[in-house]
Amino acid sequence: MEWKTAITKVEPNHIHIRGYAIQDLIGKHSFGEVVYLLFKGEMPTPAQGKLIEAVLVATVDHSVFAPSACAARFVASGGVPIQSAVAAGLSALGDHHGGAIEQCQKLLEEGVRRMQAEGKSAEEMAETLLREHKQTKKRIPGFGHPYHTADPRTLALFNLARELKQDGPHIQLAEAIGAKSEAAMGRKLVVNTDAAQAAVLAELGFPWQLARGFFVISRAAGLSAHAYEEITRERPFRAVDLKEVVYDGPADR
């Protein structure tokens, strides 16, 4: 059986990533630039590389607030190798944790296509999307946060995109949704980091199907730190306090 790949060529004493010798990448290009190369097949411009690096930094960790960190630490306390704990944490990434980047990017891409086809401004399309989601009672992915009322990661990413002249209609639409949300939904929806990264990745031309991959790459670093800290600093076998366990099954029989 033949396996075909256009990503990496390996021969004796030679490794090429998308045609670039690995030794020519080491020390000369950032991790973000090489991730861009892996996903897109071409080396980014300096501005694009810097923005991708920022995307990877933005979601590197969010403390034990996140289910993935809890999962990684809980599993690490069982005495497994660090990669098993990290894998457990990554397995917790789904539609409700980490998946909103993918969902939001798809929403923004479709919204921008509609903007252009219908001749609407970002503000007008934002109002349309908010109204449609309110009517169907669907949550808008990437907007709102259980803890932050102003996500500091969002402001940093959008400011950097503007500074690097990488901003465009996807960022405009994301900001417009946040700005119009209170009037349309009755409450202010913060543009969280999921929406910010989704908008930036869309501006850079990445398909929405890759969006969750960026989150996985970024959060793996934070989960590794959590797993190591749990292994080296905490007592083994982290357990739920039985006082916090409420049994609601059938009576003894």
Image (cartoon, grey):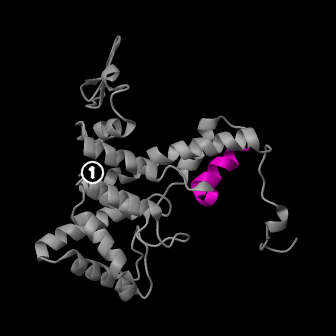
Q: Front-most of 199 and 85?
A: 199
Q: Amino acid at mark 1?
A: Phe
Picture coordinates of residue 58 (x, y %)? 45, 53
Question: Is 57 left, or right, of 203 in this rendering?
Answer: right
Picture coordinates of residue 175 (x, y %)? 32, 71
Quadrant of the snapshot with the C terminus: bottom right
| SS for dot 1 | loop
| Identity of the residue drawn at 36% across and 88% down | 183
Picture coordinates of residue 33 (x, y %)? 32, 38
Q: Is residue 214 visible?
A: no
Q: Front-most of 149 and 65?
A: 149
Mark 1: few/some/many CA within 10 Å (<14, 14-19, 20+)? some
For residue 230, what is the image quadrant? top right
Magenta residues, dominant SS class: helix
For residue 18, what is the image quadrant? top left
Q: Is residue 54 above or below residue 183?
A: above
Question: Is 168 left, or right, of 87 in this rendering?
Answer: left
Q: Is residue 35 above or below residue 149?
A: above
Question: Is 85 left, or right, of 52 in this rendering?
Answer: right
Q: Is residue 73 magenta?
A: yes
Count of labels in the image: 1
Q: Residue furthest right?
A: 252
Which residue range is magenta in the image?
64-77
| Identity of the residue drawn at 84% across and 66% down | 243
| Identity of the residue drawn at 24% across and 54% down | 166
Mark 1, residue position: 206
Picture coordinates of residue 234 (x, y %)? 77, 45
